[in-house]
Image (spheres, rainbow, N blue to C red):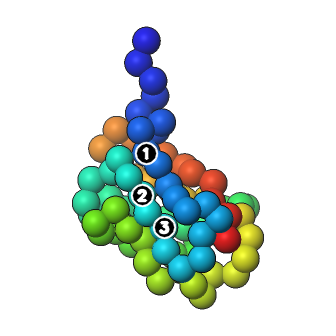
Amino acid sequence: SEYPFEYSIDVYPNPFTASLQVTGVENGTPYSMLTIDGRLLRQGQIINETIENLEDLPSGVFLLQLETPKGTVIKKVIK
């Protein structure tokens, strides 16, 4: 059987400090960074498999929401 496509998407480092690498998504994939209770902190597009300028986010647990052609993927990330 086929694995769900979200298993082919990898996010690292986790925990992160200033940036995240996101592999398995197309260039320009829209993302949203949410608090664990769903509050939007940041949104943009993944460029060259990278999300940058995250150093100003507080420490904590976040939900990285990716809008891919196959559907929405949510990855839990820690700073």
Label 1 close to label 2 by CB (< 8 Å) = yes
Q: Residue 45 location in percent, x, y?
A: 34, 68
Q: Is residue 28 left or right of residue 5?
A: left
Label 1 close to label 3 by CB (< 8 Å) = no
Q: Which residue is labeled 3 in the image?
A: 20
Q: Which residue is labeled 1 in the image?
A: 9
Q: Which residue is labeled 2 in the image?
A: 22
Which residue sits furthest bottom? Answer: 56
Is 6 in front, or is 40? 6
- Helix, strand or loop at label 1? It is loop
Q: Residue at 60%, 69% (x, y): give it.
A: 16
Reading the chain from its start, which is encountered first: label 1 or label 2?
Answer: 1
Q: Residues within 10 Å of mark 2 (few under 14, many from 20)?
A: many
Q: Amino acid at mark 1?
A: Ile
Q: Amino acid at mark 3?
A: Leu
Label 3 close to label 2 by CB (< 8 Å) = yes
Q: Quadrant location of residue 40?
A: bottom right
Q: Is residue 68 left or right of residue 14?
A: left
Against 16, residue 74 (above or below) is: above
Q: Residues within 10 Å of mark 3 (few under 14, many from 20)?
A: many
